[in-house]
Amino acid sequence: MSGPASTRRSTLAAEIRQRTGLNPARCYQCGKCSAGCPMAQETRLRPHDILRLVQRGRRDRLFADDSIWLCLTCETCSARCPNEVGPARIIDALRELALESGEGEPPRAIRAFHESFLKQIRRHGRIFEFGMIAGFKLRSGKLFADVAKMPATMKRGKLALSPRRIAGVDDVRRIFDACSAAARKEVQP
Ligand code: SF4
Ligand code: SF4
């Protein structure tokens, strides 16, 4: 086939291949990845659907859907794949492409969770749950969601009110700084 549709199709698969070294064309739709995916019940597109859309060059479908952002990067799909396609890394590459091209972005709640999580790791070297929940609620606008569960959670000792910092927190911060510097370098023309 020739023309704009086929060019676009090969472009997405080629971009993924260049970025990851993985070849989406190797997927033969056996569905083993989706059968083991812990998020398959929560997403419209399961891993094998995503691979099929990559093969077909359907950036519009992939970037308009929340599914790629709901992936937990647990790697179960990649471990189960009999043909070493690597769906987890391919989904990660799709996220990178969506953000870089401006064609898609994570839903507000998912972005809020990641930002809150990373901020806690940078500050304490580990998760301080109370601070993370507060940060998530402020960023996501979900101020009163699950508030009724807090007393029981605190009673069970699952929600400490003060953070504990790890001894190597300066090393953790150096890793964050190095990653930020590398990311800035990548986006420079
Ligand atoms: S890495 Fe993502 S797509 Fe793969 S099994 Fe885990 S949640 Fe599902
Ligand atoms: S397990 Fe591998 S070959 Fe099978 S559908 Fe998933 S990605 Fe494709």
Image (tube, helix red, strand yellow):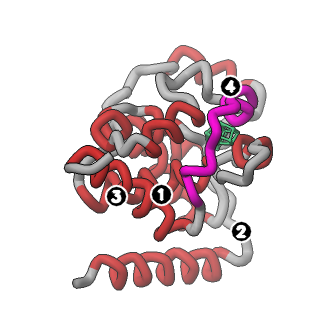
Q: Amino acid at mark 4?
A: Thr
Residue at mark 2: 166
The mark that comes first in sequence, 3 or 1, is 3
How crowded pointer 3 is (Cα within 10 Å; few <14, some 14-19, many 20+) is rated as some
Q: Which residues are magenta?
A: 23-36
Residue at mark 1: 93
Disc 3 is placed on an element classified as helix
Q: Is mark 4 within 8 Å of ligand 1?
A: no
Disc 2 is placed on an element classified as loop
How crowded pointer 4 is (Cα within 10 Å; few <14, some 14-19, many 20+) is rated as few
Disc 1 is placed on an element classified as helix
Please give left or right for residue 162 compared with residue 178 in the image: right
Label 3 to label 2: alpha-carbon separation: 45 Å
How crowded pointer 1 is (Cα within 10 Å; few <14, some 14-19, many 20+) is rated as some
How crowded pointer 2 is (Cα within 10 Å; few <14, some 14-19, many 20+) is rated as few
Q: Amino acid at mark 1?
A: Ala
Q: Position of residue 85 (x, y in %)?
A: 66, 52
Residue at mark 4: 153
The quadrant of the rendering that contains the C terminus is bottom left
Q: Amino acid at mark 3?
A: Thr
Asked whether residue 139 is in view, the answer is: no
Please give left or right for residue 179 compared with residue 125 in the image: left
The mark that comes first in sequence, 1 or 2, is 1
